[in-house]
Image (cartoon, coloured by chain):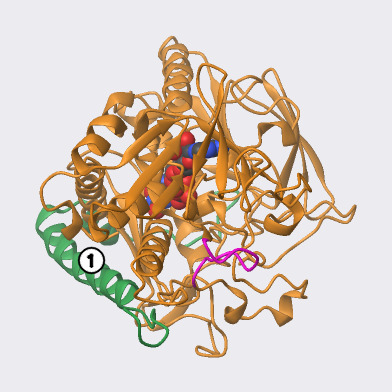
Amino acid sequence: MRPPETPSSAAVPTRATAFLRTFVPWQLFRFAAINLKMIRMILLSHRGPGRDGPGR
Amino acid sequence: MARLLVLGAGISGHTAALVARRRLPAAHRVAVVSPLETYNWIPSNIWVGVGVMAPSEVLVPLRPVYEKTGVDFVQGRAVELRPDGSAEDPAPHVVVETPDGGRRREPYDYLINATGPKLNFAATPGLGPSGFSHSVCTSGHAADAARGFLECVERLKRGERQTLVVGMGHGTCTCEGAAFEYVFNVEFELRRHGVRDKARLVFLTNEAELGDFGVDGLRFRQGGYVVHSRFFAESLFAERGVERIVGAHVREVQKGRLRYSTLDGGEGELAFDFAMLLPPFTGVGLKAAARDGRDLTAELFAPSGFMKVDADYAPKDWADWRAGDWPRTYASPSRPNLFAVGIAFAPPHAISRPRRAPDGTPISPAPPRTGMPSAIIGRAAALNAADLMLGRADRPRRTASMAELGAACVASAGAGWWSGTAASMTMYPIVPDYERYPEFGRDLDRTFGEIGSAGHWIKQILHRMFLYKARAKPGWWLIPE
Ligand SMILES: Cc1cc2nc3c(=O)[nH]c(=O)nc-3n(C[C@H](O)[C@H](O)[C@H](O)COP(=O)(O)OP(=O)(O)OC[C@H]3O[C@@H](n4cnc5c(N)ncnc54)[C@H](O)[C@@H]3O)c2cc1C
């Protein structure tokens, strides 16, 4: 069989990757993991290096 | 008793006003000047723009919130700063144009300018709602865009072929992430309506490569490699069959047609049935004058109209840009009781590498100031002003440099609880710091991205949480910016 005429060089997800993106049990786990990462980022950005000497 | 005046009730100004009000004893006044009576949670305008959310769901009436919290609200548009007063009034004040066409003086001891952007549709002939393309920058624009989009869907249902173009309406736009979200929401909705096969969808951007997002792209660890965000963006475009035109500057929009040029010197035309193209931003055009009437605008504001703060504005080559160029306290160097936050402050330079077409046309993203940093900066300025008002500090000490802040972003790629997805990303810091992170400018342990339904759920939760916070409901202050 001939390959498609203009095969894209972009990476495309495998069937498993695409499936997992909307597979609820896996996404519930990712939901917890992403929230943790974001909370860490929020805490870091609120805490600083953010303060310049005394006076808070 | 001292008075803090906040200009603008968007993400940064509303945050600043509520934070300052909570921090200051009642004897001190906090007042907000804003032309509109509502607060707009702009990130959700994307969903209004495809017709899955009503404008009322992204708006919060301001008066009840300010009555409840003890903030004075002045409906009007600030037009001129008089930092040293004027002949009629020696105290610092702002001249405000009221909705009935009148003018009034609003005095201040401390001022936070949070006026956001002017949507500069005029930069490209024919761009914008009064021309031939749509926008989603305000809830009203987004509602109009939804009407245009749904008409397009009706034509597709009748079997007509349609071309939809989404992207940036000028070579110097910012907010590429918002256009990215919109194009994938449009794509998702076309599928939901069962008409995807008849629609040609084109993304037109000023980014030199997809995934730049105005922050020079991100790098993530993935599968044993460090990969650029371009990899993810291109993958999503390929998967969803969205065509792209990169490194493009729109020269003119006409009815159903646009002309553009590209970084490689190319010229192109694109016929469309529906276009949503974001405008470039400038400052809102505030003027400033000394007591004797001498014009201070150039002293206080950059040529872009954004207010100068404690950044290093010396012109530098890209190779000489430093994280330390970025402002830390957002105080004006010429008036220590003036602050500018959110989109209203003048950035020292872009974050993405500047690029020009062979004819000299600049085509590269302006630096974004997204919701999270805008709100954190608003909060820092409010606390600095409060410290100064309370005599707890003799100069602003709280800092919120974008080269020291991280950002968490969720870019929707389709709204549906089970089938919708979004790209969740964190980056640290927002402005790459090649002195601290010599290889990639950012901390790879804190920079990541992935696509899935979890992102959509987070986006939905953020929508509810930030509207709750904007309404200043019980415990609002526990919700971080
Ligand atoms: C379509 C879209 C989608 C987006 N999505 C996201 C997202 O998903 N996540 C994210 O983090 N960021 C997102 N952003 C960016 C985000 O909206 C901005 O970072 C944020 O709104 C900036 O806040 P601001 O307070 O500086 O400006 P704004 O929110 O624009 O507020 C400016 C305020 O000033 C008022 N004003 C204007 N002129 C005057 C004047 N002369 N006098 C007094 N008041 C005045 C305005 O009425 C308004 O109340 C998006 C932006 C757009 C356009």
In the displayed structure image, the side of residue B198 where residue B334 appears, left or right:
right
Chain B as rendered: colour: orange
Instruction: Name the residue at 21% across, 55% down.
Output: B454
Magenta stretch in the rendered image: B329-337
**Quadrant location of residue B68?**
top left
Q: Amino acid at mark 1?
A: Ile
Q: How many marks?
A: 1
Say if B369 sits above or below B11 in the image.
below
Determine if residue B240 is in view: no
x%, y% of residue A8?
A: 55, 55
Q: Nearer the viewer, residue B474 or B52?
A: B474
Q: Identify the chain of the residue marked 1, using the numbered disc in the image.
A: A
x%, y% of residue B467?
A: 24, 41
In terms of secondary structure, where does tag 1 sit? helix
Determine if residue B205 is in view: yes
**Quadrant location of residue B259?**
top right
